[in-house]
Image: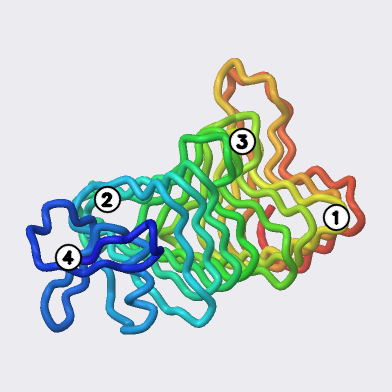
Amino acid sequence: LVTHNDLKDCQHVELQNADRAVSKTIEHGDIYYYNLQDNINTSTKTGYQIYAIRNFDASYPITVTEGADITFDLDGYVVSAGDDWTINGKLTVADSKASEETGSLRASRPITNNNELIFTNAKVTTLSANTLINNNKNLTLTNSTLSSEYGYTLEVSESNTKLTMDEDSYIQTSTKDIYVIRNTSADFIIDGGNIAGRNRVIKNETNAKLTVKSGNIYSSSTANESIVINTISNSGYLSIEGGKISASATEQSQSPTETINHGGQDLTITGGEI
């Protein structure tokens, strides 16, 4: 069992009952860890995959350092992230038991991706008003869902940033008054997947550059919602090369419907369906 010595800021290794452990590696025998960050620190050196072994709260900051390549398998468990996660290397969050629909990563503080973040068969949610993911580089989803209740699901502010998703992946929010994705200043590419909002989906701000290569981006409104439906609000530079962009409202809804609200600096459409 590997625990953390807070006074000396180092790992403490002992042979004992692993009831308090939260994760493990299995190469060369099971090694259990009480602290997920300690497991990440060790796997940074060994390359061993990390497995959750119970539902647990990670109430401390998590950092993946530059050059590290970490794979964390939720293995059907719920991991609650109570503090910031910072990804400076490569992190893959997977769920090998996704078919059981029991596992998820629940964040109450932002996950900041500065290099490469991959979700495979994973469900990632936030119930807080914070942004779920601050994406500053490459984000890839395969059969995964990112969702938020009160804040942005994805916020982008750095150049040369890309979101890649397969057709079975979703980024969404259930909140009608906030956008799913906010691009504040980045050169941002969206390629694939499904991005859905109740009324508003993507906000591309002044001087920000957004390129849509493929994917299904859509908004919808239900009865008694008077807010303007706005699939993409563009104040910057918007280039649509492919994909499908749509907006819809029920007959009972009084919402004005706008697929693209362009009051921005440039709009170029060379492909896709609107």
Figure quadrant of residue 72? bottom left
Q: Are marks 4 and 1 in contact (CB under 8 Å)?
A: no
Sequence-wise, which precedes: disc 4 or disc 1? 4
Tell me the CA gap for discs 1 and 2. Answer: 38 Å
The image's mark for residue 236 is: 1
Of 76 and 198, the residue lying toward us: 76
Tell me the CA gap for discs 4 and 2. Answer: 24 Å
Horizontal side of 124 relative to 244 (left or right) equals: left
The image's mark for residue 103 is: 2
Badge nearest the viewer, 4 or 2: 4
Label 1 element class: loop
Per the image, the residue denoted by label 3 is 248
In the rendered image, residue 123, in percent from the top left (x then y), is placed at: 37, 52
Per the image, the residue denoted by label 4 is 1
Q: Residue at x 76, y 67 (%)?
A: 187
Badge nearest the viewer, 3 or 2: 2
Sequence-wise, which precedes: disc 1 or disc 3? 1
| Amino acid type, callout 4 | Leu
| Amino acid type, callout 3 | Ser
In the rendered image, residue 231, in percent from the top left (x then y), is placed at: 68, 43
Figure quadrant of residue 118? bottom left
Circle 1 crowding by C-alpha within 10 Å: few under 14, some 14–19, many from 20: many
| Amino acid type, callout 2 | Gly
Q: Are marks 1 and 2 in contact (CB under 8 Å)?
A: no
User: Is residue 20 at all visible to an observer of this figure?
Assistant: yes
| Amino acid type, callout 1 | Gly
